[in-house]
Amino acid sequence: MKLTRQIILDTETTGLHPNNGDRLVEIGCIELVNRRLSGNNLHFYINPERDMPEAAAAIHGLREDFLKDKPVFADVVREITTFSQGAEVIIHNAAFDLGFLDMEFKRLGLAPYSSLVASVIDTLTDAQKMFPGKRNRLDDLCNRFGVKNDHRTLHGALLDAKLLAEVYLCMSRGQNDLMMDSGVEKSSHSSFQFQLPPASDLMIINASSEEEALHQKLMEDIAKKAINPPTWLH
């Protein structure tokens, strides 16, 4: 059986604009093989070779004194390349992270990072299609799917990648448990459960004509705000 290898990836940076000198300061990657955590992860703190704006440090807590003795990107690019080669990469707001990775590769005269991977799944784009008109930040999706993130006080690439792995499995198959290669094991970060009562205990209550009209109006409002046509209109 052919193995499906996926990488959940997240980064932290000095700012928002790689074309204006902002740099990567952290990268975290979680490997899934056939939708199971393999335990084979990649994580680096990176010296950005520049100052750290306080606005960025307030988000991830990484400051110059901590990063000054960390490897520069050129020192870790080979490991990042080897780890990512040929995998399907899953990122929340992929354009942001790929913009920084591609720029770091370009600085070293290398082909773009995005050219190394088999494909990219953007969970933000997918979430916007699933939940049109709603906020779809990673925190919002954690709350929506019952993925516990109350232990997170600052953003961190590896921690966010772990949260995104749980969210992605919920989004893509309604699966809330991360299945380890060594056997079935529930993630300690997830409490999301599906429990249905016996069919004999279910009560069927038909909607009133007023409720049906309100429902139809809600569906029309959602369709108007959706980026792409909702599936129920296909």
Image: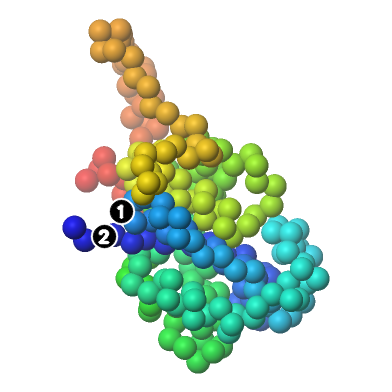
Looking at the image, is 24 positioned above or below residue 7? below
Instruction: Please give the label number shown on residue 34.
Output: 1
The amino acid type, in three-letter code, at marker 2 is Leu
Q: Residue 195 at what x, y percent from top left?
A: 37, 22
Of all residues, the one furthest to the bottom in this rendering is 109
The amino acid type, in three-letter code, at marker 1 is Asn
As drawn, is 209 to the left or to the right of 28?
Answer: left
Q: Residues within 10 Å of mark 2 (few under 14, many from 20)?
A: few
Q: Does residue 169 appear in the picture of this structure?
A: no
Question: Splitting the image into 4 quarters, where does residue 217 fall?
Answer: top left
As drawn, is 145 to the left or to the right of 25?
Answer: left
Are the residues flagged by discs 1 and 2 in contact, CB closer than 8 Å?
Answer: yes
Residue ID at (44%, 82%): 112
Instruction: Please give the label number shown on residue 103.
Output: none
Work out how far the residue at label 1 is from the one at label 2, CA to CA, in angstroms: 6 Å
> Helix, strand or loop at disc 2?
loop
